[in-house]
Amino acid sequence: MEQHYQHLYEMLTQVHGYIYPNEIDLQWSLLIVLYPYITGLVAGAFILASLERVFNVKVLKPTYHLALLTALSFLLVATLLLVSHLGHPFRAYEIMTTPHGGSAMAIFGFVYLWYLMVVLLLEIWFDYRRDIVLWSRQSKGLKKWIYKILTLGVTDLSPKTLKWDDKLGYIITIIGIPSAFILHGYVGFIFGSVKANPWWSTVLMPVIFLFSAMVSGIALVMFIYMAVSYLRKQKINMLALDTIAQYLFYILVLDFTLEGLDQIHRIYEAEESFEILSLLVHGKLFITLFIFQMFLGTLIPLISLGTLQLYKPKEKTRRFIYLASSLLVLFGVFFMRWNVVIGGQLFSKSFHGFTDYKIFLVGSEGLLMSILWIIIPFFILAFLLWLLPPWKRIDQKNSVV
Amino acid sequence: MKQSRRNFIKKAATAATGILATGILSPFNAVIFATEKPTDPTKVWWGYGIDIEKCIGCGRCADACKSENNVPREPFYFRNWVEQYTIKNNGEVKVESPNGGINGFVQTVPEEDIFKSFFVPKMCNHCHKSPCVQVCPVGATYDSPDGVVLVDETYCIGCRYCVQACPYGCRYIHPEKNVVDKCTLCYHRISKGKTTACTEVCPTNARILGDLNDKEGALVQFMKEHNCLILKPHLNTGNKLYYNGLNQEVR
């Protein structure tokens, strides 16, 4: 408590202009920056996976299962961040038992559960069921039992059943696409519907969140695919990688256009909040917005990926550009979330001044904890790849990786 | 040809089913929030008036509120505070509220630079279309039947969404309870026929608690006699805190 007060007294000296006295305590910290970031990665990775399944983009086959498992690994962590940020984490269940219908946040639990249980888990299960059954027969010890449990007792491998697996998996993917859109569009709506905050309150917010989600998710799968191939000492399927990069480029163009439109609209309308927001972007957000998000995270990947659409250098060069672009995009989208979440709390709703945000190194909302939250999904992914390796799928047609 | 007709019928039927399915969404009418209306006009409907012309910036209201409601004494937690607005000759606006005005104010702008200066007491607007009630995911923040926005601290999960949604900065997270806290309009007092702590201590009678449904009551009379305005009217939150003498610079 004393430490918190001390921090707030320190923040009091950082205030510029006037802010409402209750605004010194910044409410949504780094954890809430990570939450839309991670859900965005989930939605993006899933949408990339669905491209292969629904739109029949066969060249993406090598990344299909990887993208699904990536989405699951990150989705499992997304809620933990939110719950750990609550003032009363043990009351979190109330959001499911007595949701308030008018609240944008109340639907969270349901959207999340729908996405996790109905879309991701089911799709992965139908995709892997045959392999799980076969693996449960071949494996030994504990692994055998894990597979046995995962079959849920459905061990029928007749061609008819397998055909049904495929059909149901396909239907779930079709349901999954709008679900992924809803999942992340909805996260954008949580911010976009706050009319008290002019930095958040824009009808474009859900759309911008969605497109930046796709951008970051695709970049993540691209990075993971390269990393996993490197670790497994396997040759990268350049055709798949080129195609992913192409999608990344197109969606990056759309994302950039939408975000640009949002800013141009703000500048042209120049409403009451214009002055304070202008001071915000040119002051406290200058580095994270113009340098990190726009220049490093958007323009450089846009130019380098765009160039590759016209001119194809050697494989090695391309691989390097893809690696750098995916990391830059991931970096840029993180700061996009930062600029929205933290940026929206740095100026006073009185429009008369600014407060500041200082990250702690330790503590439940500190930097180390946040880094841990980002690392955990990779461990989950490693476990999932050990348990359900896409490259060991027995179905010869699908084991291209 | 036959095939395409069959396909067409199939697609049309799917679309029709989809449209019909939206019918089950009617419970979500709750999200259309701005249409909500005040309750029964024959019952009490609490509102509040502040006469800026009478406020002398003594800060006793902010102090009394902290004592009455056990608000932490640190200068980051206020249910009630006073702002000093100083408009300079060059049009620049300076706002200050050291410790919420509890220790009074010292004018820091030289006399010759001042165009005008005044005090604006702030508190929860007890909006009847309040964004804080709208966004609370569990319904811990709610409207009382007599028009007071309250918080059930045994139910609040501490998500802080309401703090973000309040355009007037009237909410804070209680540092010990880890739940949101705000002005209750001294509900424990007004429901027993007393007035609020801040109203009681105001030495100039700049603060008026009243029933908006009582056409002969003090608040309605105050509104009749003065040109009252609300804060940020464009946000359409249905404020029930009315100011006399509110300058356009005040936000």
Image: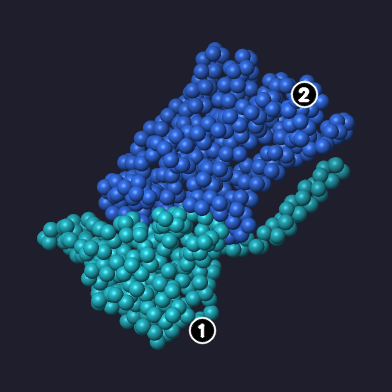
Chain colours: A blue, B cyan
Q: Is residue B130 visible?
A: yes
User: On the picture, is A396 further left or further right than A210?
Assistant: right
Q: Is residue B78 left or right of residue A166?
A: left
Q: Which residue bears the numbered disc 1?
A: B42
Q: The C terminus of chain B appears in which quarter of the rendering? A: bottom left
Estimate the x, y position of residue B43 in percent, counting from the top left.
50, 82
Q: Residues within 10 Å of mark 2 (few under 14, many from 20)?
A: some
Residue A274: % across, % down: 35, 50
Q: Secondary structure at mark 2?
A: loop
Q: Is residue A277 visible?
A: no
Rendered view: A352 above or below A68: below
Task: Place residue A343 in its image quadrant.
Answer: top left
Helix, strand or loop for disc 1: loop
Nearest the eye: A90 or A277: A90
Q: Quadrant of residue B57?
A: bottom left
Q: Residue furthest left?
A: B112
Q: How many residues crowd around disc 1 within 10 Å: few (fewer than 14), some, or many (20 or more)?
A: few
Q: Do callouts 1 and 2 point to residues on the same chain?
A: no
Q: Amino acid at mark 2?
A: Ser
What residue sits right under mark 2 in the picture?
Answer: A139
Residue type pointed to by label 1: Thr
Figure quadrant of the N terminus of chain B: top right
Tell me the mark number nearer the camera, choosing from 1 and 2: 2
Judging from the image, mark 2 belongs to the subunit labelled: A
